Amino acid sequence: MIKNYILDTNVMIHDPFCFYKFEDNHIIIPIICIEELDHLKKRDGIVGYHARSAARELSNIRKNGSLSEGVKLESGGTIRIELNHMDFTQLPDGLDYTKNDTKILAVAKKLQEIYEPTQTILVTKDLYMAIKGDAIGLDIQDYQNDKIETDDLYKGYMDTEMYSKDIDAIYSGGLMASEHLKSILFPNEFLHIKSLDREGHEIIARYDGQKIVPLKYQTEVSWGLTPINREQKMAYELLLNPEIHFVTISGGAGSGKTILATAVALQKVIEQGQYRKVVFVRPVVPAGNDIGYLPGTEEEKLRPWMGSFYDAIESLVDQKILKKQKETIGKGRHVVYSEKPEFSVDDFIEQYRRFGVIETKTFTYMRGRTLSDALVIVDEAQEITPHLAKLMLTRAGFGSKFVFIGDPSDNQIDNVLVDAKSNGLVYTIEKMKPFNLTGHITLKQVERSPLAKIAEQSM
């Protein structure tokens, strides 16, 4: 049955291309939402960018007809801008009639009456709008198109059992996966295999798309750091494998996401020169990625937001680094270090930043760039929208590797435009898992400290 979907402004900010995802139904946009887009267009960061993108898409659509009368879409539905029917008489006195949200509710309630019995639904990502809309009798829905439907997010590994002869075959170089396993495994998924007939005989292995193979990098040391549990060993395998170009790592606070990725980045860029530079990217939330009001250069503005990277680097820059008189940067360039006790992580990063080996960025400064021969780490990826995640990955040039890290649980999300099932991290985990050049792992154990472990598990 054909439905009417009334879009709140935040839906268009979440996904500027949402107009094409309602099949053959009718889309209605209250004029006040266009006014809100106009107000948001000058905002720095992703909010302003998405507001402008949504307006451009509406402009493209209006080339095919009048938006006030309705334009036919290729999906078979229509889209129009509602100019009238802002009727407050059906709203309770407790609402503030000067607020735009109340005006949108007034339009939606009136259209519900006009179009009855056709179902009219208000689509919003605003929790308070949803509560108020439900209270006045509206049908309310969240924007579902890019939500991950499953409650069991892909974790990147499975536990299974095999006979010892098969485990021995894996140790010897690899075992062709059975048809049963092929049907349930994704490329670069890990298996913790225990023996059915020999106690204590086990292996952690990876499915390479054809065979189950032993881990290759689990004993490798990156800047003095080695993995200390099975999931960290799996993460290292993905991070160190040059044939895997996109890695996602999820896990709670203290599980090692940032320090693992940072250690591998410093090793691959500074020690080995496999990549030309490392780019640390972090969304600025909840300020909407707007750092324009802060004083100083781009790096100075970003410093407060890059604490996790600075902490990780500070932990990794140990005494053996400080005692070196020379350190290779990239390919063939050098910098001389002093052994002054006051040597700081800021000094270290600034040395490499001057050579273009380390960059710290927010998403505001990533549009239009192509990142080639770079290792790009996106921290707090649960704060970005699926659209922004896609935008980020399309920056990938030849020879680059992208790593998304974050904790997708609801209590770790400050961005009102996303939730645990609609953020850019879970979206990319689910959408990218079928491909040979991608891999994911969920870190479970908290390794930061006993106190951090108790807090993560008990509070």
Image (cartoon, helix red, strand yellow):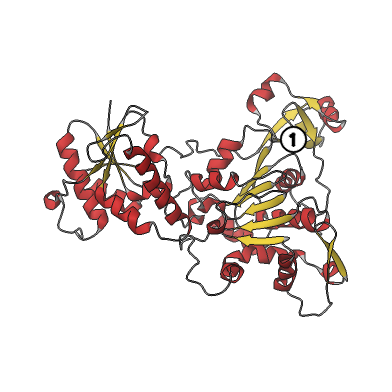
Per the image, the residue denoted by label 1 is: 206
Q: Residues within 10 Å of mark 1 (few under 14, many from 20)?
A: many
Query: How many numbered discs, if any?
Result: 1
* Three-letter code for the amino acid on which mark 1 is drawn: Arg
Of residues 142 and 68, the one nearer the viewer is 68
Of residues 63 and 182, the one nearer the viewer is 63
Q: Tell me where residue 22 appears, x and y as whole percent.
A: 36, 33
- Is 434 above or below relative to 222? above
Q: Based on the displayed image, in which of its 4 quarters is residue 116 positioned?
A: top left
Query: Where's the N terminus, which quadrant?
Result: top left
Q: Tell me where residue 440 appears, x and y as whole percent.
A: 65, 41
Q: Residue at x 54, y 56 (%)?
A: 363
Of residues 239 and 280, the one nearer the viewer is 280
Q: Based on the displayed image, in which of its 4 quarters is residue 128 positioned?
A: bottom left
Q: Tell me where residue 99 appears, x and y as whole percent.
A: 24, 59
- Is 143 above or below relative to 414? above
Q: Is residue 26 visible?
A: no
Q: Residue at x 76, y 42 (%)?
A: 242
Q: Residue at x 25, y 35 (%)?
A: 70
Q: Residue at x 39, y 56 (%)?
A: 41
**Secondary structure at numbered mark 1:** strand
Left/right of residue 127 with respect to residue 310 in the rendered view: left
Q: Tell me where residue 293 appears, x and y as whole percent.
A: 47, 71
Q: Residue furthest left?
A: 89
Q: Is residue 414 visible?
A: yes
- Is 256 above or below relative to 389? below
Q: Residue furthest top?
A: 179
